[in-house]
């Protein structure tokens, strides 16, 4: 199994992302439920335009963040650190992402918030189930895997 496939399988089983944005010298983090898109290597989420993180992001912004589980033992720790870009989706792109998101999180039908995409450009996956401190790396530019 290649690196991106291993990372993608794990990301598809999780549901909460933390991401941070930077604007005019200020940092801010946010959390949201997400849907992982393996084909585009992206996370889709809903967040209102009036939130602090959306205001700081504008239409598009660089981001960094994490996805992690909550294991009770060190040997089961798994988590992703990432760098990428967040952007607000519009039109057909937004409609398609919302439809997929609502299949995973039907309760979100009551939220009129816009759909955002976090394009993952760099991923570091720590997976202690493969051995203590085991890291898998993926970069979008090369679509190459590193161990």
Image (spheres, rainbow, N blue to C red):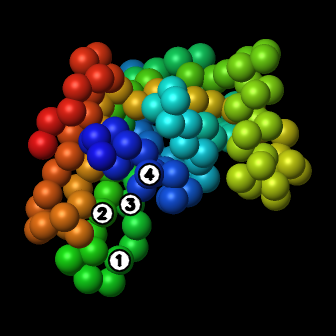
Q: Give the structural element (helix, strand or loop) at label 2.
A: strand
Q: For mark 2, what is the residue?
A: 78
Real-space Cα separation, disc 1 to disc 3, in angstroms = 9 Å
Q: Report the front residue among 49 and 144.
A: 144
Q: Residue at x 24, y 60 (%)?
A: 127
Q: Is residue 136 left or right of residue 43?
A: left
Instruction: Give the quarter of the image for residue 113.
Output: top right
Q: Earlier in the sequence, mark 1 or mark 2?
A: 1
Q: What label sits on residue 68 in the rendered view?
A: 3
Q: Residue at x 79, y 15 (%)?
A: 91
Q: Earlier in the sequence, mark 3 or mark 4?
A: 4
Q: For mark 1, what is the residue?
A: 71
Q: Is residue 19 left or right of residue 48?
A: left
Real-space Cα separation, disc 4 to disc 1, in angstroms = 17 Å
Real-space Cα separation, disc 3 to disc 4, in angstroms = 13 Å
Q: What label sits on residue 7 in the rendered view?
A: none
Residue that extends furthest to the right in the rendered view of this protein: 110
- Label 1 with label 3: CB-CB less than 8 Å: no
Instruction: Give the quarter of the image for residue 140.
Output: top left
Q: Earlier in the sequence, mark 2 or mark 3?
A: 3
Real-space Cα separation, disc 2 to disc 3, in angstroms = 6 Å
- Label 1 with label 2: CB-CB less than 8 Å: yes
Q: Give the structural element (helix, strand or loop) at label 4.
A: helix
Mark 4 or 2, which is nearer the eye?
A: 4
Q: Earlier in the sequence, mark 4 or mark 1?
A: 4
């Amino acid at each position: 199994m290649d690196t991106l496939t291993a990372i993608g399988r794990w990301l598809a089983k999780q549901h909460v992302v933390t991401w941070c944005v930077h604007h005019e010298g200020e940092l801010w983090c946010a959390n949201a439920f997400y849907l992982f898109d393996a084909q585009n290597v992206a996370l889709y989420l809903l967040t209102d335009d009036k939130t602090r993180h959306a205001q700081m992001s504008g239409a598009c912004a660089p981001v960094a963040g994490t996805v992690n589980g909550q294991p009770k033992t060190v040997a089961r720790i798994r988590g992703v650190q990432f760098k990428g870009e967040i952007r607000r989706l519009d039109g057909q792109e937004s409609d398609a992402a919302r439809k997929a998101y609502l299949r995973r999180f039907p309760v979100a039908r009551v939220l009129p918030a816009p759909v955002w995409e976090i394009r993952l450009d760099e991923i570091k996956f720590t997976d202690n189930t493969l051995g203590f401190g085991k890291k898998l790396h993926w970069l979008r530019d090369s679509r190459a895997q590193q161990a």
